[in-house]
Image: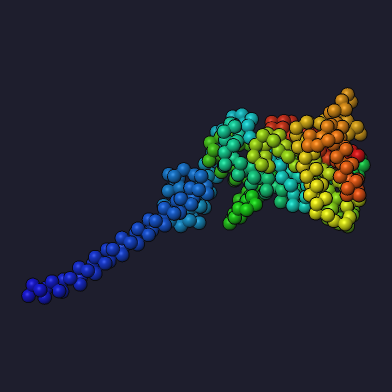
Amino acid sequence: MWGRRLRHVAPAATAALDGGARRGLHASRASCSRVAVIARLRKETQCSMAKVRQAVEAAAGDYDAARRWLDADLVTSGRAKSAKLGDRAANEGCIAVLRHPSGALGLVAEVNCETDFVAKSDVFQHLVRQIGTSVLLSDAVEAASAAAADAADATTASTTVRARELDVEALKTLPTLMPPGEPPLLEYKPLSDSLAEAVGKLGENVVWRRAAVLGVPVSTQRRATGVNNDARVSTGLHAHGGDAGSGRVAGIVVLQETPPQAPPSAELDQAKQQLADRIAAQVVGMAPVAIGETDAPDGAAPDDLLLNQAYLFGDGSVSDQLLALGSRRQSTLTVSGMLRWELGGSDSTGPSSAAS
């Protein structure tokens, strides 16, 4: 009799144990899934562990919902912190310098924070790259460079390329774009929200101070020559005192060619771009006050003029290097625009003018 009872009880007990095991396994898998979501969000957002756990709990373990929760919380807390920190001096930071895909436009943007430690942090550097990418690929850059070209045509020689300050407050409404190589954002987020998020993460006053563009707009060059501007114009970029693409000092030069070298040569095109970048490094390192004699201020010494300066990367002067490469390309190379910014400098876009 006892044997029969045991035989009847055993299946029920086994089923109960199996059910408990399955429930335990399900709970374990759910727990592992949440741990993975927490780890991913920690890596992507660099928020505190407590804040990430709060977001994951509120989203019932769903990654997308938790990410939206965190983004909204960061913006809210960042704006609150900005209101408290707004009076604190922000004298550190960096200047980002980027080249437009056309090759004929350069952008500089200065973003400030309170300490050098934060300026070197991944969060701050990522914010600067976001700002640079978002502005560079917007219509504002093309419009500003076209306006600068129109203003120059009305007052000086048509070859003059002048820098144009951008309205930072207006730019803050642009959608945030991720730097090259990173997945795009799934939802629209203005740059103002990205700035607020950075304040929330860093706990310091963060100020986007200024931005400017220097170069030749694609549309203008196509109207004038019937060809894309990169056949005639190259922008050289350089930054010093920071990571690649940003630093405490940044410079841009515009190198124009008349007529374009023909037939095309990859080797000579590379040489032209290298020369443009090295002349930009010359501008950053030697701080010329003007390109040449035609735009030199009164009392400027010969060594203060870019074209007269000894070339930092080879023999002769900067002018000699332009003549030498122009001879190889069977063309005339001209530095037609120059910009140099220092961290915390004035709002002036610096010297930029035509020179032969």
Relative to 242, is 226 above or below? below
**Closest to the observer, 170 or 68:** 68
Q: Residue at x 37, y 59 (%)?
A: 29
**Closest to the observer, 285 or 18:** 285
Scheme by which the image is coloured:
rainbow
* Total numbered labels placed on residues in the image: 0
Q: Position of residue 69 (x, y in %)?
A: 49, 51
Left or right of residue 225, residue 179 in this image: left
Is any atom of residue 59 visible in this view? Answer: no
In the rendered image, the residue lying farthest to the top is 299
Q: Residue at x 89, y 41 (%)?
A: 323
Quadrant housing the N terminus:
bottom left
Q: Residue at x 84, y 28 (%)?
A: 304
In the rendered image, the residue lying farthest to the front is 315
Is any atom of residue 327 visible in this view? Answer: yes
**Closest to the observer, 287 or 113:** 287
Left or right of residue 126, residue 28 in this image: left
Q: Residue at x 83, y 50 (%)?
A: 268
Q: Position of residue 213 (x, y in %)?
A: 76, 43
Left or right of residue 11, residue 147 in this image: right
Q: Position of residue 148 (x, y in %)?
A: 83, 43
Q: Position of residue 343 (x, y in %)?
A: 69, 32
Quadrant housing the C terminus:
top right
